Amino acid sequence: MNETAGTPEPKPTAEPTVLQSALRGLACKCPRCGEGKLYAGFLTLAPSCDRCGLDYAFIDAGDGPAIFIIMLAGAIVVGCALVVEVKYQPPFWLHAVLWLPLILATTLLPLRAMKSLLIALQFHHKAAPGRLVDRAK
Ligand SMILES: [Zn+2]
C-alpha cells in the first residue's frame, strides 16, 4: 500500500497562489519557477529563464512600476519636506541636501522589485493586450 495515501503531494506544475507569485516577484525571480533570474542588468530583463526556459518576451510592465514608485516616493518626500519646513524653516540648500538622497533612495531602491512584482502578477493573471475575437465563426 502506498504510504502517502490520503496526503496527496502537490503537483509540480500546480499554479502558484497570488502570494507565491508576488513573493517571486519581490525576490526578482522567474514568475513561473521562482528560481531563475529575471534580470540581466539593473532593470534589463534576461531573454529567458535560466532554469525553466520561460521566454520573457511576453513581459510588458510598461510605466506601471514607475507610476507606483512616483506616487509612494512623492508622498514620502513631500510629506517629510513639509514637516521639516513647518517645524524648522531650514535654508533651501539644506532641503536639497536632505531630500535629494531621499528621492534617490525612495525611487531607485524599490524600482527593481516593483517592476518584478508587476511582471509576476502579469504572469499570474495571464494579463495581455486585448484582442478582437471573431464571434461569427
Ligand atoms: Zn523559470
Image: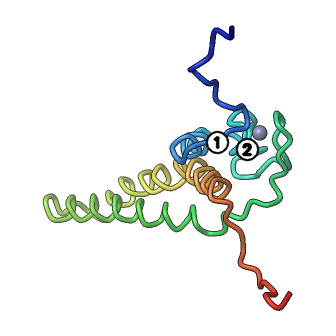
Identify the residue at the far bottom of this view: 136
Dot 1 crowding, Cα within 10 Å, few <14, some 14–19, many 20+: many
The amino acid pointed to by label 1 is Cys
Where residue 28 is drawn, which disc sits there? 1
From the viewer's perspective, tell me whether residue 15 is left or right of residue 100: right
Residue on which disc 2 sits: 38
Give the quarter of the figure containing the N terminus: top right
Residue 63, image quadrant: bottom right
Residue at screen point 59% across, 57% down: 118
* Residue shown at 41% from the left, 52% from the top: 102
Secondary structure found at label 1: loop
| Quadrant housing residue 126 | bottom right
The x, y position of residue 100, in whole percent, is 44, 57
Task: Give the alpha-carbon distance from disc 2 to disc 1, as whole Å.
Answer: 6 Å
- Ligand 1 - quadrant of the structure image: top right
Look at the numbered disc 2 and give the secondary structure of its residue: loop
Mark 2 vs ligand 1: CB below 8 Å: no
